[in-house]
Image: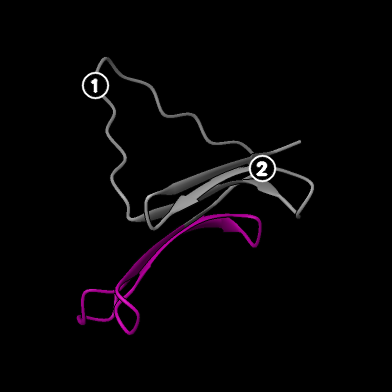
Amino acid sequence: MEGDGAWALVHNANNRLYYDTDTTTLYIKAQNVNMSGSSVDISTPKFYLGQGSTQFISGSNGNIEISS
């Protein structure tokens, strides 16, 4: 930690968790992520689940799109 609030947990380039104080962004990069619990809330004004532009679920501005 640099004393500016930035921090990182790094295993390698493909598996890391870090906070960027310049963009106030929390980055999670991993080959597999497991979130579990009896109450998991994810709140966001827009989202994208998928990879590329052929199979995905996305939402923003009151709209939702499912493509397969």
| Direction from residue 48 to residue 19 in the image, left or right | left
* Placement of 64 over or under 7, stated as above or below: above
Q: Residue at x 38, y 58 (%)?
A: 61
Amino acid at pointer 2: Phe
In the rendered structure, which segment of residues is drawn in magenta?
1-27
* Placement of 46 over or under 20, stated as above or below: above
Give the residue pinned by disc 2: 56
Residue 62 is marked as: none
Q: Residue at x 35, y 80 (%)?
A: 23
Horizontal and vertical percent for residue 26? 37, 62
Q: Secondary structure at mark 1?
A: loop
Question: Which quadrant is home to the C terminus?
Answer: top right
Horizontal and vertical percent for residue 51? 71, 49
Residue 18, magenta (yes or no): yes
Q: How far apart are the two marked residues, 2 and 1, measured between alpha carbons?
A: 24 Å
Give the residue pinned by disc 1: 39
| Direction from residue 13 to residue 58 in the image, left or right | left
Horizontal and vertical percent for residue 8? 40, 64
Amino acid at pointer 1: Ser
